[in-house]
């Protein structure tokens, strides 16, 4: 966990050693000093002699001073419980990370996505390289400074001493890499509006010898949804001399169906050509499909049912016609795109406040995680959600709230992102407005006896694995090809891997 470090500007520096005294000018032949007399001789009996340490002081006195120094060492910071004193700041405990890097952009990028690359799956060799795409949030007075940033992070090295010996056969033997600074390269696509949410999708190229086409959908503050082909931007990083033309910076499609801005957006993982859902602040959801010719068509019949803003949309990872949406009306609704009525099949009231985010497990597809405005995140078993007559009409399909299979009220501010681990359905990453990213292991359970040995820390669930400090934390994503590596964004980007995952 992060630790807090007191900054003491008045701390004294190390004592300076004095000069060696000049040797005494003594003539051995004519020594008038006489015999040296010990004035302390026989003052203590042999049994009463006090042993002194290396600095000449009694051991008990020196040990007491060492204990005082130890008590001033950095202590564990517990989110929502520990308060920073004046002059104290949070610093990460480097010994808990395998890798930790911070990368800054000209403006904060509060939404981003990770791009799959051709460097291989399950890679663990350091330094690490990855590709991402993000949308900026420039100052309101400088809206024309906004852009989509297509980025390459490289030189992401392992921390000195990070990890364990079991990794040594797969990691770089070049220790010099560990001291290098990471490199951020980027290509900018100009925008005139802030990005609310951005998501990427890769579709196979018609030429099998070429890399997949990478499409990016951006929900902007202007209410327009922009789709860009960023394939040439990605290619340019590894092809020296490549110049991006103004035409390549233009969107291949602009969706103008929404009347207001929105946040909910997702590409279907089961429609390779490209099928996109977008939801706005009036609760309206539209579907846009990529045609065989490479164009895009938006269905004019919206999905209607939410009584508040659509904050999140996620396609089912296993059923091509099913998606779920979360809203400020406190509900999660499950839809079937084959329905001519365009009404939700299931509606569940899961919170009394806004449901901001959710994540559908790709491994155990009946599990859905959600996060709300009160700082609560929960896990739901969709098999327990049954459609009813009321649900088909768009109202709540059950009396009262359903029961989550797990729920945590650890964070004290709104949940801003939640995402399942791509290969372990017991691990979840969560970011929140308390400037933290937390990692959770749902497989952990403690009985009553074990819970007594938690060090007396109250209200900290045993499932909590790790707390990472991220100022203005907004989104967190697991890298799908580099096990255990996360990227989080807020005031800046953090790329990290802990020793616990």
Image (cartoon, helix red, strand yellow):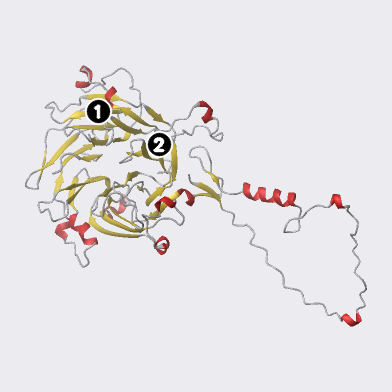
Label annotation for residue 333: 1
Quarter occupied by residue 413: top left
Quarter occupied by residue 270: top left
Is residue 224 visible in the rendered structure shown here?
yes
Q: Where is 236 relative to 318, above or below?
A: below
Element class at badge 1: strand
Q: How crowded is mark 1: few (under 14 residues within 10 Å), some or many (20 or more)?
A: many
In the rendering, at what x and y percent does residue 1 appear?
48, 44
Q: Distance between the residues labelled 2 and 1?
A: 26 Å
For the point 73% across and 56% down, the residue is 53
In the rendering, at what x and y percent does residue 63 appear?
70, 50
Of marks 2 and 1, which one's residue comes earlier in the chain?
Answer: 1
Q: Where is 291 relative to 52, above or below?
A: above
Which residue is at the front of the view, 364 or 307? 364
In the rendering, at what x and y percent does residue 426 appear?
36, 35
In the rendering, at what x and y percent does residue 340 appear?
11, 27
């Amino acid at each position: 966990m992060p630790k807090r470090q007191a900054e003491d500007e008045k701390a004294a520096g190390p004592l300076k050693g004095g000069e060696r005294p000049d040797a005494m000018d003594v003539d051995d032949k004519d020594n008038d000093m006489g015999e040296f007399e010990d004035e302390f001789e026989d003052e203590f009996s042999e049994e009463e002699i006090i042993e002194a340490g290396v600095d000449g002081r009694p051991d008990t006195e020196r040990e007491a001073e060492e204990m005082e120094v130890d008590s001033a060492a950095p202590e564990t910071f517990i989110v929502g419980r520990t308060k920073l004193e004046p002059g104290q700041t949070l610093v990460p405990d480097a010994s808990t990370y395998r890798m930790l890097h911070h990368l800054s952009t000209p403006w904060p990028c509060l939404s981003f996505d990770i791009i799959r690359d051709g460097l291989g799956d399950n890679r663990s060799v350091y330094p690490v390289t990855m590709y991402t795409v993000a949308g900026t949030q420039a100052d309101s007075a400088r809206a024309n400074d906004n852009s989509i940033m297509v980025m390459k992070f490289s030189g992401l090295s392992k921390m000195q001493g990070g990890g364990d010996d079991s990794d040594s056969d797969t990691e770089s033997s070049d220790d010099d890499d560990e001291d290098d600074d990471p490199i951020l390269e980027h290509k900018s696509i100009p925008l005139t509006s802030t990005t609310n949410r951005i998501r990427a999708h890769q579709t196979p190229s018609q030429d099998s010898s070429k890399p997949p086409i990478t499409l990016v959908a951006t929900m902007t503050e202007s209410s327009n949804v922009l789709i860009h082909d960023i394939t040439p931007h990605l290619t340019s990083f590894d092809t020296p001399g490549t110049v991006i033309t103004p035409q390549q910076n233009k969107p291949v499609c602009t969706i103008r169906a929404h009347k207001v801005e929105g946040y909910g957006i997702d590409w279907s993982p089961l429609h390779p050509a490209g099928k996109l859902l977008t939801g706005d602040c009036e609760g309206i959801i539209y579907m846009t499909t990529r045609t065989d010719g490479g164009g895009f068509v938006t269905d004019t019949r919206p999905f209607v049912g939410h009584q508040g803003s659509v904050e999140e949309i996620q396609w089912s990872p296993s059923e091509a016609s099913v998606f779920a949406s979360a809203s400020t009306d406190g509900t999660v609704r499950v839809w079937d795109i084959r329905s001519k009525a365009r009404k939700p099949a299931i509606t569940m009231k899961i919170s009394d406040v806004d449901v901001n985010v959710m994540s559908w497990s790709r491994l155990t597809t009946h599990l859905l995680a959600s996060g709300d405005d009160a700082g609560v995140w929960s896990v739901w078993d969709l098999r327990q959600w049954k459609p009813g007559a009321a649900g088909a009409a768009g109202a709540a399909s059950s009396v009262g709230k359903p029961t989550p299979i797990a729920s945590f009220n650890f964070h004290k501010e709104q949940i801003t992102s939640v995402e399942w681990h791509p290969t372990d359905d017991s691990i979840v990453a969560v970011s929140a407005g308390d400037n933290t990213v937390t990692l959770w292991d749902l497989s952990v359970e403690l009985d009553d006896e074990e819970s007594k040995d938690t060090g007396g820390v109250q209200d900290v669930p045993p499932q909590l694995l790790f707390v990472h400090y991220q100022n203005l934390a907004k989104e967190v994503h697991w890298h799908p090809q580099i096990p255990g590596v996360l990227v989080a964004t807020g005031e800046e980007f953090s790329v990290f891997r802990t020793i616990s995952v």
